[in-house]
Protein backbone atom coordinates (compact mmCIF):
# COMPACT_ATOMS: atom_id res chain seq x y z
CA UNK A 1 0.00 0.00 0.00
CA UNK A 2 1.28 3.45 -0.90
CA UNK A 3 2.48 5.77 1.83
CA UNK A 4 0.15 8.74 2.48
CA UNK A 5 2.77 11.29 1.33
CA UNK A 6 3.26 9.38 -1.91
CA UNK A 7 -0.47 9.45 -2.60
CA UNK A 8 -0.67 13.19 -1.89
CA UNK A 9 2.24 13.77 -4.26
CA UNK A 10 0.54 11.82 -7.03
CA UNK A 11 -2.66 13.77 -6.48
CA UNK A 12 -0.73 17.04 -6.77
CA UNK A 13 0.89 15.90 -10.00
CA UNK A 14 -2.50 15.02 -11.42
CA UNK A 15 -3.99 18.41 -10.63
CA UNK A 16 -0.94 20.22 -11.97
CA UNK A 17 -1.40 18.40 -15.26
CA UNK A 18 -5.04 19.45 -15.31
CA UNK A 19 -4.21 23.08 -14.65
CA UNK A 20 -1.29 23.50 -17.03
CA UNK A 21 -1.59 20.83 -19.68
CA UNK A 22 -2.84 22.20 -23.02
CA UNK A 23 -4.39 25.27 -21.31
CA UNK A 24 -5.41 28.04 -23.75
CA UNK A 25 -3.79 31.49 -23.53
CA UNK A 26 -5.81 34.28 -22.01
CA UNK A 27 -7.66 36.51 -24.50
CA UNK A 28 -5.97 39.80 -25.34
CA UNK A 29 -7.47 43.14 -24.35
CA UNK A 30 -10.12 44.62 -26.64
CA UNK A 31 -9.10 47.17 -29.22
CA UNK A 32 -10.95 49.51 -31.55
CA UNK A 33 -11.52 48.78 -35.24
CA UNK A 34 -10.30 51.23 -37.87
CA UNK A 35 -12.89 52.36 -40.44
CA UNK A 36 -12.14 51.86 -44.16
CA UNK A 37 -11.13 55.33 -45.41
CA UNK A 38 -10.72 54.34 -49.05
CA UNK A 39 -9.67 57.28 -51.22
CA UNK A 40 -10.09 59.64 -48.26
CA UNK A 41 -7.05 57.99 -46.69
CA UNK A 42 -4.64 60.15 -48.70
CA UNK A 43 -5.90 63.51 -47.44
CA UNK A 44 -4.62 65.50 -44.48
CA UNK A 45 -7.55 67.92 -44.91
CA UNK A 46 -10.90 67.15 -46.55
CA UNK A 47 -13.91 69.48 -46.64
CA UNK A 48 -17.05 67.88 -48.11
CA UNK A 49 -19.75 70.54 -47.76
CA UNK A 50 -22.80 69.56 -49.83
CA UNK A 51 -23.13 73.28 -50.69
CA UNK A 52 -19.52 73.84 -51.71
CA UNK A 53 -17.96 77.31 -51.54
CA UNK A 54 -14.43 78.67 -51.57
CA UNK A 55 -14.70 78.58 -47.76
CA UNK A 56 -15.21 74.84 -47.59
CA UNK A 57 -11.50 74.72 -46.78
CA UNK A 58 -9.87 77.85 -45.35
CA UNK A 59 -6.33 78.25 -44.05
CA UNK A 60 -5.06 81.50 -42.55
CA UNK A 61 -1.42 82.14 -41.68
CA UNK A 62 -1.25 85.07 -39.26
CA UNK A 63 2.40 84.49 -38.50
CA UNK A 64 5.28 82.13 -39.24
CA UNK A 65 4.45 78.47 -39.08
CA UNK A 66 1.02 78.03 -40.68
CA UNK A 67 1.66 74.74 -42.47
CA UNK A 68 -0.25 71.76 -43.86
CA UNK A 69 1.93 68.73 -44.54
CA UNK A 70 -0.24 66.60 -46.79
CA UNK A 71 -2.89 66.70 -49.48
CA UNK A 72 -5.90 69.02 -49.27
CA UNK A 73 -9.26 68.18 -50.84
CA UNK A 74 -12.46 70.18 -51.13
CA UNK A 75 -15.82 70.05 -52.85
CA UNK A 76 -15.40 73.76 -53.53
CA UNK A 77 -13.92 75.20 -56.71
CA UNK A 78 -10.89 76.43 -54.73
CA UNK A 79 -9.63 76.86 -51.20
CA UNK A 80 -9.25 80.11 -49.29
CA UNK A 81 -5.57 80.49 -48.41
CA UNK A 82 -4.76 83.70 -46.54
CA UNK A 83 -1.20 84.61 -45.61
CA UNK A 84 -0.72 82.19 -47.24
CA UNK A 85 -0.39 78.89 -45.42
CA UNK A 86 2.33 76.58 -46.68
CA UNK A 87 0.79 73.46 -48.23
CA UNK A 88 3.27 70.64 -48.75
CA UNK A 89 1.03 68.44 -50.86
CA UNK A 90 -1.52 68.54 -53.65
CA UNK A 91 -4.65 70.70 -53.65
CA UNK A 92 -7.63 68.85 -55.13
CA UNK A 93 -10.73 70.97 -55.79
CA UNK A 94 -14.27 70.32 -57.07
CA UNK A 95 -14.34 66.79 -55.68
CA UNK A 96 -17.49 64.91 -56.62
CA UNK A 97 -20.19 64.82 -53.95
CA UNK A 98 -21.48 61.44 -55.13
CA UNK A 99 -20.22 58.45 -57.04
CA UNK A 100 -16.82 56.86 -56.65
CA UNK A 101 -14.33 59.13 -54.95
CA UNK A 102 -12.86 60.44 -51.71
CA UNK A 103 -16.06 62.20 -50.58
CA UNK A 104 -18.18 59.06 -50.85
CA UNK A 105 -15.47 57.02 -49.15
CA UNK A 106 -15.29 59.52 -46.28
CA UNK A 107 -19.06 59.40 -45.70
CA UNK A 108 -18.91 55.61 -45.81
CA UNK A 109 -16.10 55.59 -43.22
CA UNK A 110 -18.08 57.97 -41.01
CA UNK A 111 -21.02 55.55 -41.05
CA UNK A 112 -18.89 52.41 -40.70
CA UNK A 113 -16.97 53.56 -37.65
CA UNK A 114 -20.16 53.17 -35.57
CA UNK A 115 -20.94 49.77 -37.11
CA UNK A 116 -17.42 48.48 -36.45
CA UNK A 117 -17.28 50.04 -32.98
CA UNK A 118 -20.82 49.72 -31.56
CA UNK A 119 -21.99 51.62 -28.49
CA UNK A 120 -22.15 48.31 -26.63
CA UNK A 121 -18.33 48.26 -26.68
CA UNK A 122 -18.02 51.76 -25.19
CA UNK A 123 -15.81 52.63 -22.25
CA UNK A 124 -16.18 56.04 -20.54
CA UNK A 125 -14.49 58.93 -22.36
CA UNK A 126 -11.24 59.84 -20.56
CA UNK A 127 -11.53 63.43 -19.32
CA UNK A 128 -8.50 63.56 -17.01
CA UNK A 129 -4.77 63.05 -17.54
CA UNK A 130 -3.64 59.45 -17.67
CA UNK A 131 -2.69 56.44 -19.76
CA UNK A 132 -5.29 55.18 -22.22
CA UNK A 133 -5.29 51.56 -23.42
CA UNK A 134 -6.56 50.61 -26.89
CA UNK A 135 -10.34 50.44 -27.10
CA UNK A 136 -13.56 52.32 -27.84
CA UNK A 137 -14.30 55.36 -25.68
CA UNK A 138 -17.60 57.21 -25.87
CA UNK A 139 -19.47 60.25 -24.60
CA UNK A 140 -23.14 60.83 -25.31
CA UNK A 141 -22.94 64.57 -24.64
CA UNK A 142 -20.61 67.29 -25.89
CA UNK A 143 -17.09 66.86 -24.51
CA UNK A 144 -14.36 69.35 -23.64
CA UNK A 145 -10.79 68.23 -23.05
CA UNK A 146 -9.19 71.29 -21.49
CA UNK A 147 -6.06 72.84 -20.04
CA UNK A 148 -3.64 70.54 -18.30
CA UNK A 149 -5.12 67.29 -19.62
CA UNK A 150 -2.52 64.98 -21.17
CA UNK A 151 -3.58 61.62 -22.59
CA UNK A 152 -0.86 59.03 -23.18
CA UNK A 153 -1.79 56.20 -25.54
CA UNK A 154 0.07 52.97 -24.82
CA UNK A 155 -0.13 50.04 -27.20
CA UNK A 156 1.41 48.25 -30.14
CA UNK A 157 1.65 49.26 -33.81
CA UNK A 158 -1.58 47.36 -34.57
CA UNK A 159 -3.68 48.65 -31.67
CA UNK A 160 -6.54 51.04 -32.44
CA UNK A 161 -8.16 53.77 -30.35
CA UNK A 162 -11.64 55.06 -31.25
CA UNK A 163 -13.15 58.06 -29.45
CA UNK A 164 -16.82 58.73 -30.18
CA UNK A 165 -18.49 61.98 -29.11
CA UNK A 166 -22.24 62.00 -29.56
CA UNK A 167 -22.69 58.26 -29.08
CA UNK A 168 -25.90 56.46 -28.10
CA UNK A 169 -27.86 58.40 -30.72
CA UNK A 170 -27.04 61.80 -29.22
CA UNK A 171 -25.56 64.88 -30.82
CA UNK A 172 -22.32 66.08 -29.28
CA UNK A 173 -19.50 68.46 -30.15
CA UNK A 174 -15.83 67.92 -29.29
CA UNK A 175 -13.64 70.77 -27.99
CA UNK A 176 -9.90 70.69 -27.34
CA UNK A 177 -8.44 73.68 -25.47
CA UNK A 178 -4.77 73.70 -24.38
CA UNK A 179 -4.96 69.91 -24.46
CA UNK A 180 -2.13 67.44 -25.27
CA UNK A 181 -1.71 63.87 -26.43
CA UNK A 182 1.36 61.64 -26.30
CA UNK A 183 1.99 58.37 -28.10
CA UNK A 184 3.65 55.64 -26.05
CA UNK A 185 6.26 53.28 -27.54
CA UNK A 186 4.88 51.34 -30.50
CA UNK A 187 1.57 53.19 -30.80
CA UNK A 188 0.81 55.09 -34.03
CA UNK A 189 -1.24 58.25 -34.58
CA UNK A 190 -2.66 56.70 -37.75
CA UNK A 191 -4.51 54.20 -35.54
CA UNK A 192 -6.36 56.87 -33.53
CA UNK A 193 -9.85 58.03 -34.60
CA UNK A 194 -12.11 60.76 -33.26
CA UNK A 195 -15.74 60.58 -34.46
CA UNK A 196 -17.93 63.54 -33.57
CA UNK A 197 -21.67 63.88 -34.17
CA UNK A 198 -21.30 67.68 -34.27
CA UNK A 199 -18.38 70.08 -34.72
CA UNK A 200 -14.78 69.52 -33.62
CA UNK A 201 -12.86 72.56 -32.37
CA UNK A 202 -9.15 72.64 -31.48
CA UNK A 203 -7.46 75.60 -29.80
CA UNK A 204 -3.75 75.62 -28.93
CA UNK A 205 -3.82 71.84 -28.55
CA UNK A 206 -1.64 68.92 -29.60
CA UNK A 207 -4.01 66.36 -31.07
CA UNK A 208 -3.21 62.96 -32.55
CA UNK A 209 -5.41 60.96 -34.90
CA UNK A 210 -7.95 61.21 -37.68
CA UNK A 211 -10.94 63.44 -36.93
CA UNK A 212 -14.16 62.44 -38.71
CA UNK A 213 -16.57 65.25 -37.99
CA UNK A 214 -20.33 65.17 -38.52
CA UNK A 215 -20.15 68.94 -39.03
CA UNK A 216 -17.22 71.39 -39.26
CA UNK A 217 -13.63 71.26 -38.02
CA UNK A 218 -11.89 74.37 -36.68
CA UNK A 219 -8.27 74.54 -35.59
CA UNK A 220 -6.60 77.63 -34.10
CA UNK A 221 -2.93 77.25 -33.32
CA UNK A 222 -1.56 74.02 -31.97
CA UNK A 223 -0.93 70.95 -34.09
CA UNK A 224 -2.68 67.91 -35.48
CA UNK A 225 -0.86 64.73 -36.47
CA UNK A 226 -3.48 62.83 -38.42
CA UNK A 227 -6.32 64.04 -40.65
CA UNK A 228 -9.08 66.64 -40.52
CA UNK A 229 -12.05 65.16 -42.44
CA UNK A 230 -15.28 67.15 -42.18
CA UNK A 231 -18.85 66.69 -43.36
CA UNK A 232 -19.00 70.45 -43.95
CA UNK A 233 -16.11 72.95 -43.68
CA UNK A 234 -12.53 72.90 -42.39
CA UNK A 235 -11.20 76.22 -41.06
CA UNK A 236 -7.55 76.41 -40.01
CA UNK A 237 -5.76 79.36 -38.41
CA UNK A 238 -2.01 79.08 -37.88
CA UNK A 239 -1.81 75.27 -37.91
CA UNK A 240 1.65 74.59 -36.49
CA UNK A 241 1.55 72.23 -38.27
CA UNK A 242 -1.26 69.97 -39.47
CA UNK A 243 0.52 66.84 -40.67
CA UNK A 244 -0.85 63.80 -42.46
CA UNK A 245 -0.28 60.56 -40.52
CA UNK A 246 -0.14 57.29 -42.43
CA UNK A 247 0.71 53.99 -40.81
CA UNK A 248 4.22 52.64 -41.22
CA UNK A 249 4.36 49.40 -43.14
CA UNK A 250 4.89 46.36 -40.98
CA UNK A 251 8.33 44.73 -41.13
CA UNK A 252 8.00 41.45 -43.03
CA UNK A 253 8.46 38.33 -40.92
CA UNK A 254 11.53 36.33 -42.01
CA UNK A 255 10.79 32.95 -43.53
CA UNK A 256 11.51 30.24 -41.01
CA UNK A 257 14.21 27.69 -41.89
CA UNK A 258 12.62 24.25 -42.30
CA UNK A 259 13.51 21.83 -39.52
CA UNK A 260 14.49 18.34 -40.54
CA UNK A 261 12.13 15.64 -39.30
CA UNK A 262 14.07 13.15 -37.15
CA UNK A 263 14.07 9.54 -38.27
CA UNK A 264 12.12 7.40 -35.77
CA UNK A 265 14.14 4.76 -33.92
CA UNK A 266 12.98 1.30 -35.05
CA UNK A 267 11.47 -0.97 -32.41
CA UNK A 268 13.63 -4.09 -31.78
CA UNK A 269 12.11 -7.40 -32.87
CA UNK A 270 9.84 -8.87 -30.24
CA UNK A 271 9.48 -5.57 -28.33
CA UNK A 272 6.18 -3.77 -27.98
CA UNK A 273 6.17 -0.04 -28.77
CA UNK A 274 4.60 2.16 -26.09
CA UNK A 275 2.04 4.48 -27.73
CA UNK A 276 2.38 8.18 -26.97
CA UNK A 277 -0.60 9.87 -25.34
CA UNK A 278 -2.18 12.88 -26.95
CA UNK A 279 -2.48 16.10 -24.94
CA UNK A 280 -6.17 15.42 -24.18
CA UNK A 281 -5.48 11.81 -23.23
CA UNK A 282 -2.68 12.97 -20.93
CA UNK A 283 -5.07 15.31 -19.12
CA UNK A 284 -7.72 12.58 -18.77
CA UNK A 285 -5.11 10.17 -17.41
CA UNK A 286 -3.89 12.79 -14.93
CA UNK A 287 -7.46 13.43 -13.79
CA UNK A 288 -8.06 9.70 -13.27
CA UNK A 289 -4.78 9.42 -11.37
CA UNK A 290 -5.76 12.32 -9.12
CA UNK A 291 -9.19 10.85 -8.35
CA UNK A 292 -7.75 7.41 -7.55
CA UNK A 293 -5.14 9.05 -5.33
CA UNK A 294 -7.75 10.98 -3.36
CA UNK A 295 -9.83 7.83 -2.95
CA UNK A 296 -6.80 6.04 -1.54
CA UNK A 297 -6.11 8.95 0.85
CA UNK A 298 -9.67 8.80 2.14
CA UNK A 299 -9.19 5.08 2.92
CA UNK A 300 -6.05 5.83 4.90
CA UNK A 301 -7.66 8.56 7.01
Image (cartoon, rainbow, N blue to C red):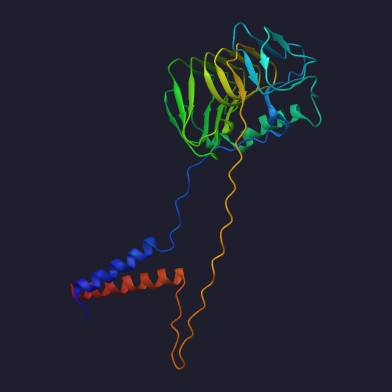
Quarter of the figure with the N terminus: bottom left
Q: Residue 166: percent from the left, percent from the top?
A: 58, 24
- Image side of residue 270 versus residue 210, left or right: left
How many numbered dots are placed on residues in this image? 0
Q: Residue furthest left?
A: 301
Query: Vertical placement of 291 versus 245: above or below?
Result: below
Query: Vertical placement of 237 versus 35: above or below?
Result: above
- Image side of residue 210 versus residue 57, left or right: left
Query: Vertical placement of 15 versus 167: above or below?
Result: below
Q: Residue 83: percent from the left, percent from the top?
A: 67, 7
Q: Quadrant of residue 222?
A: top right
Residue in view at x 48 percent, y 82 percent: 265
Quarter of the figure with the C terminus: bottom left
Q: Quadrant of residue 64?
A: top right
Q: Residue 202: percent from the left, percent from the top?
A: 56, 16
Residue in view at x 63 percent, y 13 percent: 236
- Image side of residue 109 versus residue 270, left or right: right
Q: In this view of the protein, which residue sits in the foreground, 207 or 64?
A: 64
Q: Residue 228: percent from the left, percent from the top?
A: 64, 22
Residue in view at x 50 percent, y 79 percent: 264
Q: Quadrant of residue 227?
A: top right
Residue in view at x 33 percent, y 64 percent: 16
Amino acid sequence: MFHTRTLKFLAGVGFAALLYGDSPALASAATGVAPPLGLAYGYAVLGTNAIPTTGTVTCTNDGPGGTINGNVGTTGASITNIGPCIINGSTDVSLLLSGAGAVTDFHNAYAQIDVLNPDSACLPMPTASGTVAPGVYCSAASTTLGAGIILTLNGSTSDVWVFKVGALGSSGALTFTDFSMVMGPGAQACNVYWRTAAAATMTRSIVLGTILSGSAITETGGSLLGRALATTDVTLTDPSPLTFAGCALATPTPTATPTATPTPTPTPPGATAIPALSGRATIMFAALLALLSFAAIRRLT
